Amino acid sequence: MTDLTEAPFKATSFIARDIAVERCADGTILMASRIPLELAQPNLPAYLRYRAQERPDALWISEPDRAAGTWRSITFAEARRAVDSLAQALLDLKVRKGGTLALLSSNSIEHAMMTYAAYLVGIPIVPVTPAYSLQSNAAAQLQERLSVADPALVFVQDAEAYARALGMVGEGVQVIAVDNADLAAGHLDYGALVATEPTAQVEEAFAAVDADAMARLMFTSGSSGSPKAVIHTQRNIMVAVESNLTAFGQKGGKGVTRLDWMPWSHVTGSAVLAATLISGGTFYVDDGKPVGADFARTLENLKHVSPTNYFSMPAGYVMLVDALEQDSELAGAFFANLLTMGYGGARMPDNVARRLQTLAVAHTGHKIPITCGYGSTETGPGGALVYWPTDRVGMIGLPHPGYDLKLVPLDEERYEVRVRSAAVTPGYLGLPEETANMLDEDGYFRMGDAAAFVDPTDPLAGLVFAGRISDEFKLVTGTFVRAGELHDMLMLATAPLVQHLVLCGEGEKFVAILAWLNLKAARELTGLPEASVEELNRHPQVIAQLSQALAAYNRDNPSSSRCVRRFCLLDEMPSSEAGELADKGSIRAGNVRRRRAKAVASLFADTPPAEVHTVGERA
């Protein structure tokens, strides 16, 4: 077995952890990077114009063309011409004041061109999760977002595929489609718009770009409440992205190479696209995702693209490491140019990190730094970042340039996290009360999360996530359960058998969990490669293994706030359409408990049904 402790990390260009730490009399700790953040351009269209002049023939965006069996691409110079033409077309449409551009479809070259054309002429964009337009049971989510966005224009890749969604668009809204634009009278053909000849009006619009005006509405995930429309300015976006690139030392050179699946309706996905523009790199659209059969496309794409930086959710890495271990050619391509492996949204399992590093050392002779970002839609998504080589996973890091942290003590170990930055949103659209309350008296955004120091005597060792404060709940005894912290502990204890879990027990006598299996791990355990979810959930080996893992965990954690007394394995996987999964793949526990109230109740029944299993002594 490879000795990972002796293997060196691959050389990186990370900046120093030069952090000012101030301890206040009330126990509050203020942290800020001493390294200044300098924006290279005044607005986002200026970055495109700079790259089009500086490296005109370099690829900016490339995407799979499944029908042709190849990739289609656009260079920086071609993108500049397309954006200018589309900007002129948008000016010609004389969009009403206050009208937005809603983008309903998946990531594509045309989607990006429409985005940057809108930035140029000052039309706010509203990217919407594509699933809400494509799934019939997500009509309410789509309608809610369209009502808030009040679009004057709607963009879709294919008018036929998005016909149901377009039927929900109000009167007077103009539809722009790349394919099948002729299906309905009045639809505008993207091909015709991108052929528009730019006039002096485009240069006038460029000169008038206001980096502090509303440029985008980005909906929160809803993982901790109803989705809110977060206002982003171009300055918000630039500060967030340039800060990340600065921390990684990737503002210069040939730029980053990214293959990314996250939709541009998610703040992290959109930041990755902007990072390739600002750094002068290339964005490869991943038309797969770490869900079921869709992941096969991601693996195929990774054989075509060797990224410099890769980002996914921990659940995505669970699937990826299995594939890399089974396919040496894939692993060789993946690690060839890789500088960092980033994750967010949940804790990376230790065993997954070890397996990734074992593969990295085998293929490159070096470990690859595993980084983690911490932030929110409101912070663009920055706040804290792991930007140094470390064998430890589970940290959220330290503030990076352009971001300050305020840590307000909650108890002897934990602090409430607050963030201050020029990347922080000016507010929520149509929600004046929430906007007024989002910042504290010193201008720090209230994240609603708790964090703790890895080493209280050495702040520069970094911070670890200690739970979402609003997710904490009380048992009937009045005992507090730190849900975020407990969730991570249980995921570690049950790895690799459990894919997702949700804690339950508000007002009850004990803690119990709803859980979903990692199907690959369960099939390997049982030796049944074709077994269904239903078969695995009832298989004696699976039940015994999970019961033993939880019993061992309980022996080390006997207190009522940490001990798990019952569990139930669910047949129906978490549904993104029903709001149980966020775009980034993380579980929305509150939505799961509300939607599956019957399953939650069964966990605490006096005589539980057969699918509810008791751990150790009778609950």
Image (cartoon, helix red, strand yellow):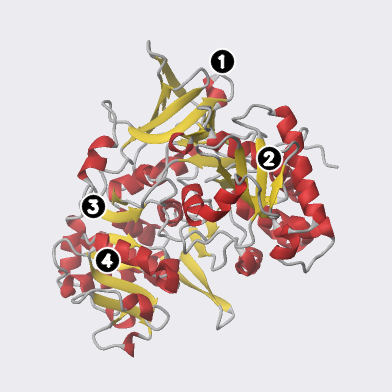
Which amino acid lies under the numbered mark 4 shown in the image of this protein? Leu
Q: Residues within 10 Å of mark 3 (few under 14, many from 20)?
A: many
64 on left or right of 400: right
Q: Which residue is label 2 attached to?
A: 492
At a point 51% along the width and 65% down the height, the residue shown is 285
Mark before the other along the chain sequence, 1 or 4: 4
> For numbered disc 1, what is the local secondary structure?
loop
Q: Please identify, in this view, whether the residue under mark 1 or under mark 2 is nearer the observer.
A: 2
Check contact, mark 2 vs mark 3: CB within 8 A.
no
Q: Which residue is label 3 attached to?
A: 214
Which amino acid lies under the numbered mark 2 shown in the image of this protein? Leu
At a point 24% along the width and 51% down the height, the residue shown is 429
Is the residue 537 above or below the residue 378 in the image? below
Q: Residues within 10 Å of mark 2 (few under 14, many from 20)?
A: some
Mark before the other along the chain sequence, 3 or 1: 3
Could you tell me residue 311's position as x and y percent? 56, 51
At a point 30% along the width and 38% down the height, the residue shown is 422
Mark before the other along the chain sequence, 4 or 3: 4
The residues tagged by marks 2 and 3 sit, at their Cα atoms, a distance apart of: 42 Å
Q: Which residue is label 4 attached to?
A: 101
